[in-house]
Image (spheres, helix red, strand yellow):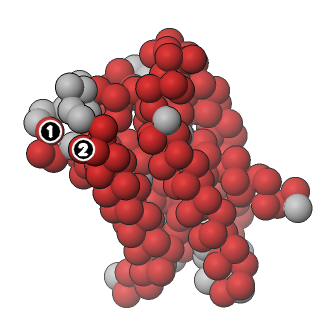
Amino acid sequence: MTELIATFIFFFAVIDPIGTVPVYIAVTRNQDDAFKKRVAIKAVSVSAAVLLFFVLAGEIILNAIKIPLPAFQIAGGIVLLLFALSMIFGEGKPESEIKSVKSATETAIFPLAMPSIASPGAMLGAVLMTRNNEFTWVEQAITSSIMLSVLMVVLILLLLARFVHRFIGDSGASIISRIMGLILTSVAVNNILAGISDYFTL
């Protein structure tokens, strides 16, 4: 049970559902409720497809180009660490991604689905949390289900975006994003250390 909760917290940190709300509000501003609902559903659906692709094919692609998983784990941990540090010390997720908004026609894909929901950290996390040499297909299915449950949380928050944003505001979302960044930093360091250990025991 503890491991399931830890996995949920990990994906909650890398996907950052609450930090996505201000981005969603910005990209759907002045649109009607039906349009907003379509954007939310499409964005979460695209994100789910992208992350499941990395669960299913990420490690296969690595093996095909002969990159050992520990090396990817170290690289992924470093990228994850930089991503987490940017959440803590740089611009918060809402501020940086709201600046990426260009037009309403591409809002569901960019910046909402990618990189706000299916972030680089989430893609790397999807691979690292479902390693074939460490987890059975049942465990990978459970991890994928937990990841999808976090995406369901994202969808619910987006559909209730006006109420959530009214409650926490931009500053609240930024604070929560930084807290998630701190949690993610410890996960990233653990991945780097585990990757180094595994690499030298190959």
- Callouts 2 and 1 close, C-beta under 8 Å: yes
Kind of residue indicated by mark 2: Phe
In depth, the one of 164 and 47 nearer the eye is 164
Kind of residue indicated by mark 1: Ala
Q: Residues within 10 Å of mark 1 (few under 14, many from 20)?
A: some
In depth, the one of 47 and 200 nearer the eye is 47
Q: Tell me which residue sits at (43%, 64%) in the image.
A: 48
In depth, the one of 151 and 29 nearer the eye is 29
Left or right: 115, with 183 as reference point: left
Image spot of residue 146 (x, y percent): 66, 63
Instruction: Choose top left, top right, bottom left or bottom right for residue 149.
Output: bottom right
Q: Residues within 10 Å of mark 2 (few under 14, many from 20)?
A: few
How far apart, in angstroms, are the residues tagged by discs 2 and 1? 10 Å
- Under circle 2, the secondary element is helix
Residue matched to label 2: 35
Instruction: Choose top left, top right, bottom left or bottom right for residue 8.
Output: bottom right
Residue matched to label 1: 104
Q: Tell me which residue sits at (38%, 62%) in the image.
A: 45
Image spot of residue 112 (x, y percent): 32, 43
